[in-house]
Image (cartoon, helix red, strand yellow):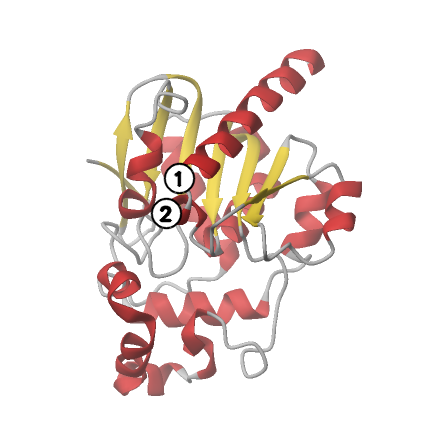
Amino acid sequence: MRDAIVTSAGARIRWTELPGGSPPRIYIHGIGAMSGAYYAEVVADPRLAGNRSLLIDMLGFGLSDRPADFRYTIDDHAAVLARALEQAQVRAAELVAHSMGGAVATVLASRYPDLVSSLVLVDANLDPYVPERQPGMSGIATYTEADFLAGGWQEVRDRVGEHWWATMRLAGREALHRSAVHLARGTTPSVREQLMRLDMPRTFIHPEQDPPLDGQQLRSAGVALVPVAGAGHNVMLDNPEGFIQAVATHSRRASTLLTRDR
């Protein structure tokens, strides 16, 4: 296990690292998850195993520290991830990021372009939403923070089921609630707008039966849309083979494009 101090109070982000070549590949999980549990199977596949790989846990989740005084905005998550990658001596990385992690990765790529060479988003959150009308993440953002900490988290636990709770229970409760609230609020400019403005290879992987909103808009901006059959939101767990093929295809495409542009 590796770690990096990322806040002035000494909070640490932690990750598991596998050796390999360039470009380094950074795996980022979604809300209430951790990268080891979601990506270990696919990272070990020979088609993806040749790159230096960091299975990183965002601050507040998994193996990383859970400071109660951190704001956990999408911008803040991106900033501390950038500090961790800088300390890991990562440059020009390929980011593979799921769900909320995809929003964080997009902001990271937009704000710290030297750290990122290409981007793979896995059913990522691109737009703000009203929690009461679209209670994603099992309604975490519909609670006030006080109500969530006082017992709302138990109601969420009972709704999410054993699989998600296995990793969600490791998260800081402030981290869970604040991350969900700020994900619903979105960023300025929006994650979608930042994604479309990026000048790098970008792929959006999504369940075949659930195409991303405004897919034509993303295609027009040069984002490759890759549907994966037989998968729900957790594409890498539901269809590992489809996920591996999509990431490997992106890597070959990115290598070709980046070599041509040099």
Residue 221 shows in the view = yes
What amino acid type is highlighted by mark number 2?
Leu
- Image height of 125 relative to 37, above or below: below
Residue 39, position as x, y percentages in the image: 34, 41
Judge left or right: residue 190 versus residue 177: right
For the point 32% across and 51% down, which residue is it? 8
For the point 39% across and 60% down, which residue is it? 31
Residue 232 or residue 258, whichever sits in front: 232
Residue 26 or residue 182, whichever sits in front: 26
Give the residue pinned by disc 2.
237
Residue 104, position as x, y percentages in the image: 50, 50
Residue 252 or residue 29, whichever sits in front: 252
CB atoms of marks 1 and 2 within 8 Å = yes
Q: Secondary structure at mark 2?
A: helix
Give the residue pinned by disc 1.
240
What amino acid type is highlighted by mark number 1?
Pro
Q: Quadrant of residue 48?
A: top left
Q: Quadrant of residue 30?
A: bottom left
Judge left or right: residue 156 versus residue 251: left
Q: CA distance from mark 1 to mark 2?
A: 6 Å
